[in-house]
Amino acid sequence: MSVADSIKEQVTTHPVVLYMKGTLSQPQCGFSANTVNVLNACGVEKIFAVDVLADPEIRQGIKDYSSWPTIPQLYVNGEFVGGSDIVTEMYQNGELQKLLQQ
């Protein structure tokens, strides 16, 4: 299975997928930590997290898959939402909570 196929399978079989640096319990960058905190504030209990630092192919593959150059990347119900800044903005205006309830 190619990296793109693996990513597609991950984002389509899990409702909330976060490609991040580090783990949910130990984020390795401030942007990843911020995104985890926002998801926790929204009450998301099941986050499928992928540590891109553990796999260089996934780290580059997710950038290619989304055409988005930075990590973290959040997917909800198979759709790319954005990175830390977009997730934070959506949370602040209530859009993220609505999206997560679908």
Image (spheres, rainbow, N blue to C red):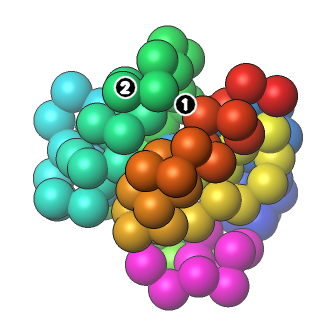
On screen, residue 89 versus residue 9, left or right, reads left
Residue in view at x 36 percent, y 39 percent: 38
Report if the CB atoms under discs 2 and 1 are less than 8 Å apart.
no
Amino acid under label 2?
Answer: Asn
- Residue 28: x, y in percent? 16, 53
Amino acid under label 1?
Answer: Phe
Q: Which mark is residue 40?
A: 2
In-front residue for pair 54/51: 51
In-front residue for pair 35/10: 35
Residue in view at x 69 percent, y 74 percent: 66
Q: Is residue 40 above or below residue 12?
A: above
In-front residue for pair 34/15: 34
- State the residue position of label 1: 48
- Which quadrant: the C terminus? top right
Q: Is residue 76 above or below residue 15?
A: below
- Residue 82: x, y in percent? 57, 66
Residue 99 visible in image: yes
On screen, residue 99 versus residue 17, left or right, reads right
Q: Residue furthest front?
A: 93
Q: Give whichever of discs 2 and 1 has the lower sequence position.
A: 2
Are there few (<14), some (14-19), or many (20+) residues within 10 Å of tag 1? some
- Which quadrant: the N terminus? bottom right
Q: Is residue 14 above or below residue 90?
A: above
Q: Does the magenta portion include 91?
A: no
Q: Secondary structure at mark 1?
A: strand
Q: Secondary structure at mark 2?
A: helix
- Residue 31: x, y in percent? 26, 61
Q: Residue furthest top?
A: 45
| Span colored in magenta | 62-73
Q: Which mark is residue 12?
A: none
Residue in view at x 40 percent, y 56 percent: 88
